Image (cartoon, helix red, strand yellow):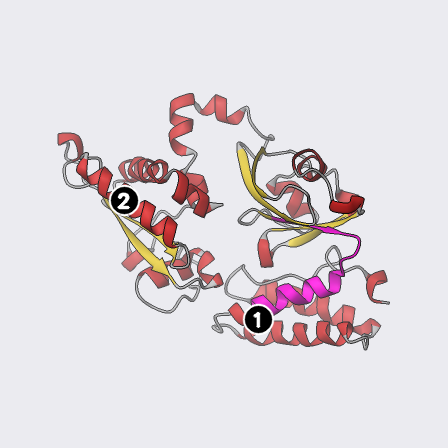
Amino acid sequence: MDRSILEGDPHSIIEAMIIAAYAIGANKGYIYVRAEYPIAVKRFDIALKQAREYGILGNNIFTTNFSFDIEIRLGAGAFVCGEETALLESIEGRRGQPRVKPPYPAENGLWGKPTLINNVETYANIAQIILNGAKWYSSIGTANSKGTKVFALGGNVNNIGLVEVPMGTTLREIIYDIGGGIPNNREFKAAQTGGPSGGCIPKEHLDIPIDYESLKEIGSMMGSGGLIVMDDTKCMVSLAKFYLEFTVDESCGKCTPCRIGTKRMLEILQKICDGKGEQIDLYKLEKLANNIKNASVCGLRTKCTKSSIKYNEIF
């Protein structure tokens, strides 16, 4: 989602960062991009050069006393750098590991200075809100989740790709009206949202409105906007194992609950997938998941909840 913005409309991000910098009195900005996104990096760099040529970036912008410039910093693709303080560590040239909070970046961020951190998708809304007004933006979405959200719709769905919908659009509408339904008329089983840190939405919640509060209520999350649809042939235990393999591999290793706890969870899931699962394993998984969630330094570690692994699928 962020990559599509950087590739398709990089100037919207530059404009928003300038506005944000002016509002808080900053003179330096950084755009943190995965090195695996070379087209996004190339196009954003071109946009930066164009902005400097037109005097939109640099010293004394439009003959005022306001100066601001943006620098691209490449990341190595570490999952943990999606956490804001790990991202700051990476920009500063250190290994991407989360910091203990407080202090928060707004007080003590890059090189000890107050720092504003926002996602690219957030910045892309700024100019439109200023042009059309806050009331216009607030008219889209739900009472507590305003605006639109871009999802990367994939998996067992006929129309895959990026879709932008108003907050509050139901999962059913996204899958069947926009996504064109499930191939071969298979039955819907679940949708995974929020990436490896997110959760699975089972069939009974097919009509849930997609917004931050509703997803959190059922144990999932919005995350970066990934939305993977699964039909009735998919095994939820195997899916949980797949995502846990990723989080184990991507753990920065800084804290014990994540470094060791996720490995123990993966061992239990492998045991279940091998047909050797016991009832006590479900208790262990849930206990471990809650401990990891509550005790790890960052909030990116995976969760194993009843909504993502159903008892009757295992025994």
* Residue 76 is at least partly visible in this image: yes
Give the residue pinned by disc 2.
46
Is disc 1 surrounded by few (<14), some (14 to 19) or many (20+) residues within 10 Å? Answer: many
The percent position of residue 114, horizontal first and vertical second, equals 31, 50
Query: Viewer-proximal residue, 277 or 10?
Result: 10
Q: Which mark is residue 275?
A: none
Q: CA distance from mark 2 to mark 1?
A: 37 Å
Please tell me which residue is depicted at 43% across the width and 55% down the height of the picture.
84
Packing grade of label 2 (10 A; few <14, some 14-19, many >=20) is few
Q: Answer with left or right where residue 207 lies relative to residue 174.
A: right
Q: Amino acid at mark 2?
A: Ile
Residue 231 shown in magenta: yes
Q: Is residue 23 left or right of residue 199?
A: left
Quadrant where the C terminus sits is bottom right
Quarter of the image for residue 306 reads bottom right
Confirm whether residue 106 shows in the render. Answer: no
Reading the image, the residue beneath label 1 is 248
Location of residue 205 by image quarter: top right
Residue 93: percent from left, percent from top = 30, 66
Front one among 290 and 73: 73
Q: Mark 2: which secondary structure?
A: helix
- Determine if the magenta segment contains residue 291: no
Q: Give the residue at x 83% y 75%.
A: 278
Residue 17 falls left or right of residue 218: left
Of the residues shown, which amino acid type is indicated by label 1? Val
Q: Position of residue 191 (x, y in %)?
A: 69, 49
Q: Nearer the viewer, residue 74 or 20?
A: 74
Residue segment shown in magenta: 227-248
Residue drawn at 49 percent across, 62 percent down: 79
Residue 228 or residue 261, whichever sits in front: 228
